[in-house]
Image (cartoon, coloured by chain):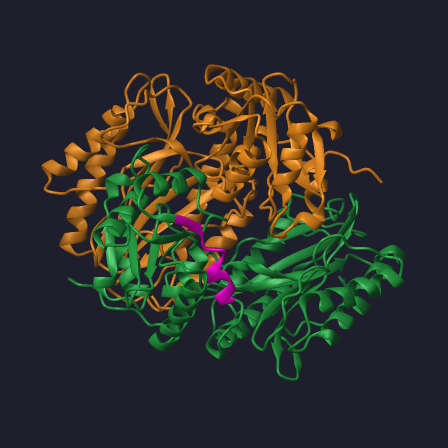
Chain colours: A orange, B green
Amino acid sequence: MPLSKGPQVFPRTEYLRRLAAVKSELMRQNIETLVVSSLANIAYLTGSIVRHTGPQCLVISIHKEGPTFIVRRADFAAAIYQTYLERDNLIVSPENRVATPDIDGYDAVIDFLHEAGLANGVVGLELNQIPAETAEKFKRRLPQARIVDSKKAVNWVRLIKSNFEISVMKEAAAIADAAIMRAIEVMRPGARETDIVADIVATQVRGAKGHPGTGFPPTAPLFFCSSPRTGAAHIPWSEDTIRDGSQINLEVSGVRHGYVVPLMRTFSVGSPSDRLLRRHEAHLAGLEAALNTVRPGATCSDVAGAFYRTIEKLGLKKDTRCGYSVGIDWAEQTASLNDVDKTELKPNMTFHLMLGNWMEEDFGYVISETFRVIESGVEVLTNMPRKLFEV
Amino acid sequence: MPLSKGPQVFPRTEYLRRLAAVKSELMRQNIETLVVSSLANIAYLTGSIVRHTGPQCLVISIHKEGPTFIVRRADFAAAIYQTYLERDNLIVSPENRVATPDIDGYDAVIDFLHEAGLANGVVGLELNQIPAETAEKFKRRLPQARIVDSKKAVNWVRLIKSNFEISVMKEAAAIADAAIMRAIEVMRPGARETDIVADIVATQVRGAKGHPGTGFPPTAPLFFCSSPRTGAAHIPWSEDTIRDGSQINLEVSGVRHGYVVPLMRTFSVGSPSDRLLRRHEAHLAGLEAALNTVRPGATCSDVAGAFYRTIEKLGLKKDTRCGYSVGIDWAEQTASLNDVDKTELKPNMTFHLMLGNWMEEDFGYVISETFRVIESGVEVLTNMPRKLFEV
């Protein structure tokens, strides 16, 4: 029996708007056909939320109205159910091409380009993420095409959110708040880290305000860097038990329909050390200086500069970027909050202002906010107090 | 203060054995230097369990004793703490190379190859997963080197586990069992899918038999494909409520130290339909036929053939492979259980025998076991009854 479409997160017009914006960018770059291979970009353009295991590509041609989504048979039902695409936008790649050495799902994409008369023009690939051997296959099997890099065309279109996307991100923000609140409740001396994290991830899935966590696994990743590992940025929880005097750097996120709102807070078990307090106060001042700089027309480097200069005056330094554009599947890999990125802020851009600081190998500190640029300046999406939490 | 090493999952000798096996494979392939960029392969060779955000590479040279791990500063503490490597095996890549357009962490890897005198030989890259633009950078910046594909050298070494690894996978198997048991307890008509999944993921983190879930986020991915979405293989849970007459195809995993043991079972809410029962019985017969075929000397295609021929006699068909080698971070991307893979089974290979079947868009069915090849035949790592669970 044919499967019907499931409830759609966004109206069809929203996807058509995104498609038009991508086509416009392709025309600007003189790319005739774009092969979208990034999961997040496919999700953006179709509504597909599948952590698939074989190649899937969305093909967009400036010469054709709709896109074509080439999926594994095992993922066809998901494409019907989740996306706004109609059946004639979908092509099934044979399952016997999964995990075979010489022919795979990308061959089905190339076959389609030949059949659709798109094999002779300028074909854009996402060279920042498509595997090297796959790009070689496109070159080999499309000898008449000119293969070029898409220069993250879709990622850059994602930078400015619609109000629909902002609504979804606010739901995700509430989940991020709930996850931190749950951490505050359960983080106690004597508690096992894994029991604390179990409660946090359950909260991430149950969600907040009636909106559960949904999307590419909404529980991942979660960083729980406790003493003596607070100098590490990206490690999972350990099998340790929380001790008096410990510090925990926690990075969680809320996820709705694949849109991620990250949130970081630092916890002190018992009274914080002077060193930790000074680090917190400096970062808090820097955070507020950065947020006060956010407004349409300011640049990413203005915001980062406000943070860097504030903490430098207080004798501190951060050598990582202090944030990045955020949306589907976490970082969008476009604008960064650092000293050199001159991207101009515009309303409905969303950033994770991420003040994690790992300058010493035995000591780090984290605090962050996810914000939206609005006409009048800035709107922080989460509601968590900017405290160094004492538990 | 210098950070000390954390508790090591495997003895140093285990990592040295793995390194020697990889070097031997490199010599066989005439590769002098291997740049390992896959997270799972780095984990295998070092113990690093970091879902990092910037390029990290492990460089192995047949001319040098130890490997060199090039990491972001923000991940340096993790490398010290988690891996067996000493400080002189570690190089910090500058943080200002994160998310910059023209220079990134891979440049630090290339710089190291130049400094270490490795820029003139045969350099292997993991072309199946390194981004196309990065492979181009290696070619451009190493004009004297001959860049070749590593042909998944590390992945193939991972195929046969040590007894240390088998022990860890048994802990992961117990977690997979616990996750399914929890699902059985909480899956009820009227329950929200998200509440059920929240309980499952909490169980995945809490673990089983005193061993919590640890590793690359041990909760991800989790597939919960309920009516009407049982024809989809890789979708996350929905916001639906479980109903009488519904079917749920559940794929979970237990994860210990990054080693994944997947497990799939199908659930029927109320009495299963005849169609579902027939599907289950045929797959059960096929599953047992496949397991009975497993022994050292048999091939992947023998095992798959036993399954395919059994269900074909019962009027069914499966066009996906029916399993794959499994270990760190799920599928190892080497041997597949299908009709064409002639890989010979050897003791301590581990496979996910995965009988998910999605031939119709509105109806699918799943059952699986993760097994180990042993001298006398087969050992199934999990203990879950091979039932169609009625809840």
Q: Could you say where residue A363 lies in the image, as x and y percent from the top left?
A: 21, 56
Q: Residue at x 48, y 73 (%)?
A: B165
Q: Could you say where residue A218 lies in the image, as x and y percent from the top left?
A: 51, 46
Q: Residue at x 48, y 76 (%)?
A: B162
Q: Is residue B168 above or below residue A302?
A: below
Q: Is residue A210 above or below residue A33?
A: below
User: Does the image show residue A84?
Assistant: no
Residue positioned most to the bottom: B376
Q: Is residue B43 above or below residue A337?
A: below
Q: Which image quarter: residue A285? A: top left
User: Does the image show residue B237?
Assistant: yes
Q: Quadrant of the C terminus of chain B?
A: bottom right
Magenta part of the chain: B147-158
Q: Could you say where residue B35 lies in the image, as x and y percent from the top left?
A: 37, 54
- Please state which of residues B209 and B16 is positioned toward the viewer in this rendering: B16
Query: As drawn, is A21 to the left or to the right of A8?
Result: left
- Please state which of residues A71 and A244 is positioned toward the viewer in this rendering: A71
Query: As drawn, is B87 to the left or to the right of B318?
Result: left
Q: Which image quarter: residue A6? A: top right
- Please state which of residues A362 and A150 is positioned toward the viewer in this rendering: A150
In reply to whether residue A373 is colored magenta, the answer given is no
Q: Residue at x 70, y 56 (%)?
A: B321
- Please state which of residues A257 and B259 is positioned toward the viewer in this rendering: B259
Q: How many marks?
A: 0
Q: Could you say where residue A303 lies in the image, as x and y percent from the top left?
A: 25, 28
Q: Is residue B273 above or below residue A142?
A: below
